[in-house]
Image (cartoon, coloured by chain):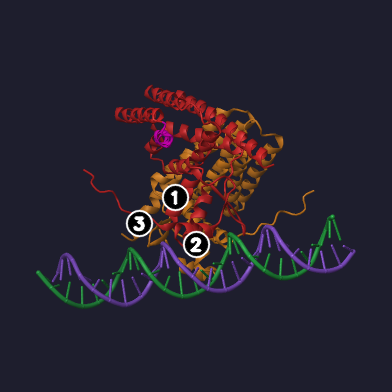
Chain colours: A orange, B red, C green, D purple
Amino acid sequence: MKVFSQIRPVSLREQVAEQIRTAIIEGRLKPNDHVVEAALTEQLGVSRTPVREALIILEREALIVTVPHRGAFVRAFNEEDVEALFSMRTTLENFAAELVIDRLGDQDYTYLEDLVDRQRHYIEQNDFKQVRSTDMAFHQYLISYSGHPLLMRSWEEIVAQVAAVLYLRAEAQPDYDEYLAISDHCAILDAYRARDLEKVKAENRRINNRVAAECLSAVRVLKGRADGSAP
Amino acid sequence: MKVFSQIRPVSLREQVAEQIRTAIIEGRLKPNDHVVEAALTEQLGVSRTPVREALIILEREALIVTVPHRGAFVRAFNEEDVEALFSMRTTLENFAAELVIDRLGDQDYTYLEDLVDRQRHYIEQNDFKQVRSTDMAFHQYLISYSGHPLLMRSWEEIVAQVAAVLYLRAEAQPDYDEYLAISDHCAILDAYRARDLEKVKAENRRINNRVAAECLSAVRVLKGRADGSAP
DNA sequence: ATACAGCATATTGTATACAATCTCATTATA
DNA sequence: TATAATGAGATTGTATACAATATGCTGTAT
């Protein structure tokens, strides 16, 4: 029985990166916000070095855009970005499907169904933070199950962007029907259970295309609001 | 007519990263080599700051593995890594194929054919550095043509790893038949010309599987040598 | 002879100081 | 008035100094 989990030192730069990442995903840092190193230094109580290193990491994750001698800015997603994001997501999820479809067992389906139930529960309680997190856990499970290091890495790089864009959707459409995700996940599970790879891929494509459209309109709405309020 | 190309300040960290990257790809830095910051500081004539920042970038590219308080080491590819690398490459190239197959025009085919000719020429001259570079340019063109920012980014992240692994193949098999790549590229071009997406995908899969097998055996051979010479 | 504690050295992690560059308001000039 | 030059302030880029940690040697006790 495993009692203790590995202790590994987590460097300041990673802690800083995590804080900034979360702030972006949760919308506390808005698109195009200027992220000033000195400000973070003060707020986080660390020196500029780990802050700078964290910003370099986040730039590689495309959550931050840096301009030489001007600084770091929160990435603003335009319509093409959203389009690209979800087509990439479809590609990665379909790749994962190829890798795992013949390896998923009953306990995996049980676990995934449990996640769906939990998500339904959180929707009923209006706990949207948990809804998002459970939703992501569903997709994450399938990706991680592949054990493919490059796939997992690519996934990690886009997942933060997806989260950031979904936040925009939530902001633009506060009354979004969260139950859609439930039926989506059930459809995916059914296709996996049937070991029907093409069906899984088609569902992934369909769902991501729909979510992409939703986020696209969110981006447009928010852009309109911004232009309207401060032209 | 475009006369001048954009001048953009290239930071020290990027220059340092480029140097280390090239050194790894060209085999001057061997797998598991300890990359000591102070040594680079001295050799490159810059301070530790840009060196550290370059190492962070390369860690995100998976060319460097860093262990807290122990330092940075050149990534050593094992057999699973090679397997994963080329299956990911297939996925990305097939995604690119979906995006570009209906957009390629005559001038594109001409350009790509010219690349193949140049590559053949370099093989005849035994200029293997140019052979590699032309080969990569062929694949790069198709990826870039997609204009898909995330695809291009993912590609960039694996292309250095592919180059590093191909260097291993060259080391293990000095008499490798370089003309194989020529017929591979012709096969890809034919499939694109026929607008046959499934054919393109099948060729990509076939070629990458073969190259993966070659690199896999290279990794095994080199591992055997290393274990034999210093057990 | 072996195992362990403790110290010396090397290396990385972090903080701070200084240099280069950009932005923007102000002023001079046509 | 419009436009360009100028300089102060802000911010990032780079260098260096100091702190924390890991490694390996040496001496000592068993």
Identify the chain of the residue marked 2, using the numbered disc in the image. B
Classed neighbour count for the residue bearing mark 2: other residues with Cα under 10 Å, few (<14), some (14–19), many (≥20): some
Please give the name of the residue rendered at 64% of the width and 59% of the height, measured from the top-left corner.
A9
**Image coordinates for residue B39, horizontal then vertical, percent:** 52, 58
Chain of the residue where label 1 is placed in the rendered structure: B
Q: What residue would you read off at disc 2?
A: B48
- Does residue A186 show up? yes
User: Dividing the image into 4 quarters, which one contains the N terminus of chain B?
Assistant: top left
Secondary structure at numbered mark 1: helix
A186 relative position to A75: left or right: right
Asked which quadrant contains residue C19, the reply is bottom left
Mark 2 secondary-structure assignment:
helix
- Image vertical order of residue A47 relative to residue B166, above or below: below
* Residue B115 position by quadrant: top left
* Residue at numbered disc 3: B9
Badge 1 amino acid:
Glu
For the residue labelled by badge 3, is the local secondary structure a helix, a strand or a loop?
loop
Residue sitting nearer the eye, A87 or A155: A155
In magenta segment, residue B130: yes
Q: Earlier in the sequence, mark 2 or mark 3?
A: 3
Q: Is residue A43 above or below residue B159?
A: below
Q: Earlier in the sequence, mark 1 or mark 3?
A: 3
Look at the image and tell me whether residue A62 can be seen. Answer: no
